Image: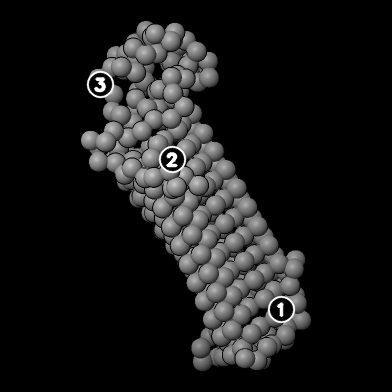
Amino acid sequence: MEKVQINKPEDLDKYYREDEGRYVIDGHLEIGCSFNIKTSLTVKGSLSIEAGEFIEAGGFIEAGGSIKAGGFIGAGGFIEAGGFIEAGWSIKAGGAIKAGGFIEAGGFMKAGRFIEAGGFIEAGWSIKGGGSIKAGEFIKAGEFIKAGWSIKAGWSIKAGGSIKAGGFIEAGGFIKAGGFIEAGWSIEAGGFIGAGEYVFSFQFAISGEWISTGLLPFWRQYWAAMPPLKKWREAILGDRCWDDLKELPTRDEADEICAWDGWHWILRGHLECYLGLKDRFEPPAEDGQIKAGPGALY
């Protein structure tokens, strides 16, 4: 397959097809400079941009092979590659981002529609999709992961910050976040689910081997209104931080709070972790939750 070398933006002009309204390269394309085009770019082979340089298109960017940029990759439309997509900085598309292989960005990754990879999806900063985020392997972000609809990984999902989906979150392995994990529908993991803050599904549908949390979901008014916590109502509604509030009940009082039969098992588990009674909790077997083997943890 022919290889085309571009060192100046104007060198690309001869590859513009007026009837198609886009630039078309029938082979591989190697770019030694940064450039911004108003329309779209199709590369039948692979697209490679030199370290430190970027490519930005008003339309879409597609390649039959892989797309690799030392800087960032940006498109007003979609970005799609038959192989992998990799950027030293960030990847941003007004439409979808899709790759047959992995998708990796040193900075953030953002798509107006879905993000999908046959391999893994990884960003040094955040990953945000207007629709779904789906990877055949793992999904990992240094900061947050957020999807308008679903987040699904064949392996694990991990974020230094929070993980949030308007629909469901699903992983064949573990799900772990430094912040909260929240889904409009369900959260399902073949391994454990661990969060530095809370884990919550608005349908109260959470499946996993075990769950660990650090904070409580909901707002102060909710917890202050619960019968087992009426003794501490004023303190809860006051300006004390959550770290201080958990020290107020004695061990016996904490046991009594969690023993109340009015709690859903998800909320009871959060309280047990928050009050220091447990470091993790398990879904009740009768709730029909998935019980994975130890091998699913790592």
* Residues tagged 3 and 2 counted as in contact (Cβ below 8 A): no
Please identify the quadrant where the N terminus is shown: bottom right
Residue at the extreme left = 286
Disc 2 marks a residue whose amino acid type is Ile
Instruction: Mark 2: give few (<14), some (14-19) or many (20+) Cα within 10 Å.
Output: many
Specify the label residue 262 is tagged with: 3
199 sits to left or right of 111 = left
33 sits to left or right of 222 = right
In the rendered image, residue 98, in percent from the top left (x then y), is placed at 49, 69
Residue at image location 41% in from the left, 53% down from the top: 172
Disc 3 marks a residue whose amino acid type is Gly
Residue at image location 63% in from the left, 78% down from the top: 47
Specify the label residue 31 is tagged with: 1
Q: Considering only vertical position in the picture, is 272 above or below 84?
A: above
Q: Is residue 116 visible?
A: yes
Label 2's element? strand
Q: Considering only vertical position in the picture, is 212 above or below 59?
A: above
* Residues tagged 1 and 3 counted as in contact (Cβ below 8 A): no
Q: Which residue is mark 2?
A: 193
Q: Nearer the viewer, mark 2 or mark 1?
A: 2
Residue closest to the eye, 151 or 226? 151
For the residues marked 3 and 2, what is the alpha-carbon distance in whole angstroms? Answer: 24 Å
Q: Is residue 164 visible?
A: no
Residue at image location 45% in from the left, 62% down from the top: 136
Q: Nearer the viewer, mark 3 or mark 2?
A: 2
